[in-house]
């Protein structure tokens, strides 16, 4: 649970896509002069992107503060409370139990990326681009996925899927509409890769719910693009309304298609057994499968 998913995400997905870009002489691994070996390996194997203000002159990433240790301490405390509450899941409303899973996913992903960034800063001695940019402030689904949520994935999918898709469809569609099939293709690839992450986590037959989740996100983002082109600034709801509608759409579709397959993996129970097995290895010096342990909490 703690190794299979992150390993696939970091190496099999991001690492492979970075090497594809490297083969075509594109960032983040290809540069002139060539990257030092430590920086090359860190960038290839970790979910990070080093700030390069020459490449992105319009963005000042250094002004975006990284989360403080106090912020992570608060999140760890909330996670412990959530885990403890999940022990009474039989008495919890299904919506509340699913919300606990949602927080577990978000915190696990944020913690994974933060740890990777911490070691990367030590290895390469460079400032890194932030992984999230206050996703709860997104004013549209396009804004949520493209500019605020898991920016490392967005920065990899853009040159590997989005731009090539635009080149393919430019022979079939007018230039003003190329973004729509390109966005759909990007979300489709993202859905397939997430489906593979879930497969590696549970070794269960794919249900394709996760893929459909991202397909729906892609269709909706395409719809937003069309509406913006057709309506423009004629109708623009208040920012607070846009934020509420955006989060409502993401959460409703997540509770419908994303969280159910994750809940079937029993992440808390499996995670607890893996922690016990890890502790048992250091205590007894024996490598025992987590399946041999029984978690007293779940």
Image (spheres, grey):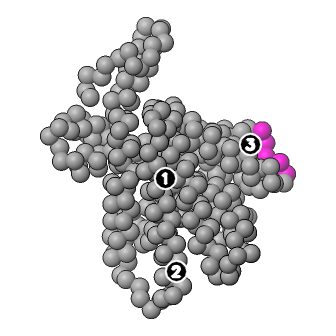
Residue 220 in view in this figure:
yes
Residue 238, by quadrant, is bottom left
Q: Earlier in the sequence, mark 3 or mark 1?
A: 3
Q: Which residue is mark 3?
A: 40
| Picture layout, residue 65 above or below residue 59 | above
Q: Which residues are magenta?
A: 33-37
Q: Residue at x 43, y 42 (%)?
A: 108
Q: Residue at x 44, y 56 (%)?
A: 213
- Whether residue 115 sits left or right of residue 126 in the image: it is left
- Label 3 to label 1: alpha-carbon separation: 31 Å
Contact between marks 3 and 1 (CB within 8 A): the answer is no
Residue 229 placement (x, y as % from top left):
54, 85
Q: Nearer the viewer, mark 1 or mark 2?
A: 1
Residue extending furthest toward the right: 33
Give the label on residue 211, or none. 1
Quadrant location, the C terminus:
top left
| Picture layout, residue 258 above or below residue 5 | below
- Whether residue 175 sits left or right of residue 95 in the image: it is right
Q: Residues within 10 Å of mark 1 (few under 14, many from 20)?
A: many
Q: Nearer the viewer, mark 3 or mark 1?
A: 1
Q: Residue at x 55, y 50 (%)?
A: 192
Residue 114 in view in this figure:
no
- Label 2 to label 3: alpha-carbon separation: 40 Å
Q: Nearer the viewer, mark 2 or mark 3?
A: 2
Q: Which residue is mark 2?
A: 226
Q: For numbered disc 3, what is the local secondary structure?
A: helix
């Amino acid at each position: 649970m703690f190794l299979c998913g992150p390993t696939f995400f970091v190496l099999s997905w991001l690492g492979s896509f970075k090497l594809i870009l490297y083969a075509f002489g594109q960032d983040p691994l290809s540069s002139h002069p060539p990257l030092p070996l430590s920086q090359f390996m860190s960038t290839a194997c970790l979910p990070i992107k080093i700030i390069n203000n020459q490449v992105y002159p319009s963005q000042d990433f250094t002004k975006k503060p990284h989360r403080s240790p106090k912020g992570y301490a608060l999140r760890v405390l909330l996670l412990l409370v959530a885990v403890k509450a999940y022990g009474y899941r039989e008495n919890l409303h299904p919506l509340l139990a699913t919300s606990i899973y949602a927080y577990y996913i978000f915190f696990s992903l944020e913690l994974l990326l933060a740890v990777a960034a911490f070691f990367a800063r030590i290895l390469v001695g460079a400032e890194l681009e932030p992984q999230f940019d206050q996703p709860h402030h997104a004013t549209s689904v396009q804004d949520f996925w493209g500019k605020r949520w898991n920016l490392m994935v967005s920065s990899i999918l853009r040159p590997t899927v989005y731009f090539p898709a635009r080149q393919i469809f430019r022979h079939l569609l007018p230039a003003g509409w190329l973004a729509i099939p390109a966005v759909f293709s990007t979300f489709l690839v993202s859905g397939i890769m997430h489906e593979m992450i879930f497969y590696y986590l549970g070794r269960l037959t794919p249900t394709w719910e996760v893929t459909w989740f991202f397909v729906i996100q892609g269709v909706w983002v395409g719809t937003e693009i069309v509406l913006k082109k057709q309506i423009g600034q004629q109708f623009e709801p208040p920012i607070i309304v846009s934020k509420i509608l955006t989060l409502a759409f993401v959460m409703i579709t997540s509770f419908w298609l994303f969280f159910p397959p994750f809940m079937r993996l029993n992440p808390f129970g499996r995670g607890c057994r893996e922690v016990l097995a890890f502790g048992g290895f250091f205590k007894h010096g024996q490598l025992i499968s987590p399946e041999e342990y029984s978690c007293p909490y779940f």
